Image (spheres, grey):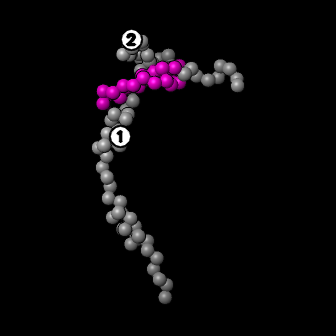
């Protein structure tokens, strides 16, 4: 492998502003020097990136997702595109 072609991979904090949720993980975004920083629970300072949606605010993971009546849609599709017998 060639050296010095990959971005650095280090700890970063992703913060969901809508849910007030943040988590520490590793990412190649750690190589960005223009990122704001935040002091984490362990006392260390890490770069922080704000995200629009995370598992704390996504309707699928929070159980607030609506269930769509797919049975009616399937039947309507079958009626519309049902093959007609040729006489």
Relative to 2, 87 lies left or right: left
Q: Quadrant of the N terminus?
A: top right
Relative to 10, 59 lies left or right: left
Q: Which residues are magenta?
A: 10-31
Question: What is the x, y in percent for residue 14?
Answer: 41, 25
Q: Residue at x 35, y 60 (%)?
A: 70
Question: What is the x, y in percent for residue 21?
Answer: 33, 27
Q: Secondary structure at mark 2?
A: loop
Q: Secondary structure at mark 1?
A: helix
Q: Residue lying furthest top in this view?
A: 43
Quick one: label 1, few (<14), some, or many (20+) residues within 10 Å? few
Q: Residue at x 48, y 20 (%)?
A: 11
Q: Are the two marked residues, 1 and 2, in contact with CB atoms closer than 8 angstroms?
A: no
Question: What is the x, y in percent for residue 38?
Answer: 38, 16
Q: Residue at x 45, y 21 (%)?
A: 12
- Decide whether the magenta segment is chiefly helix, strand or loop: strand
55, 79: nearer the viewer: 55
Q: Residue lying furthest bottom in this view?
A: 87
Which numbered dot is residue 61?
1
Q: Reply yes or no: does residue 19 show up in magenta.
A: yes
Name above or below for residue 67 compared with residue 58.
Answer: below
Q: Residue at x 33, y 41 (%)?
A: 59
Which numbered dot is residue 43?
2
Q: Residue lying furthest front in this view?
A: 42
Quick one: label 2, few (<14), some, or many (20+) residues within 10 Å? few
Relative to 75, 9 lies left or right: right
Residue 58 occupies which quadrant of the picture?
top left
Q: CA distance from mark 1 to mark 2?
A: 30 Å
Q: Reply yes or no: does residue 58 show up in magenta.
A: no
């Amino acid at each position: 492998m060639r050296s010095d072609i990959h971005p650095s991979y280090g700890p970063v904090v992703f913060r969901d502003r809508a849910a007030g949720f943040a988590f520490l993980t590793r990412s190649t975004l750690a190589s960005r020097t223009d990122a704001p920083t935040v002091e984490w629970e362990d006392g260390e300072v890490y770069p922080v990136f704000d995200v629009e949606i995370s598992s704390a605010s996504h309707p699928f993971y929070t159980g607030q997702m609506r269930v769509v009546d797919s049975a009616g849609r399937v039947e309507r599709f079958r009626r519309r595109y049902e093959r007609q017998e040729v006489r």
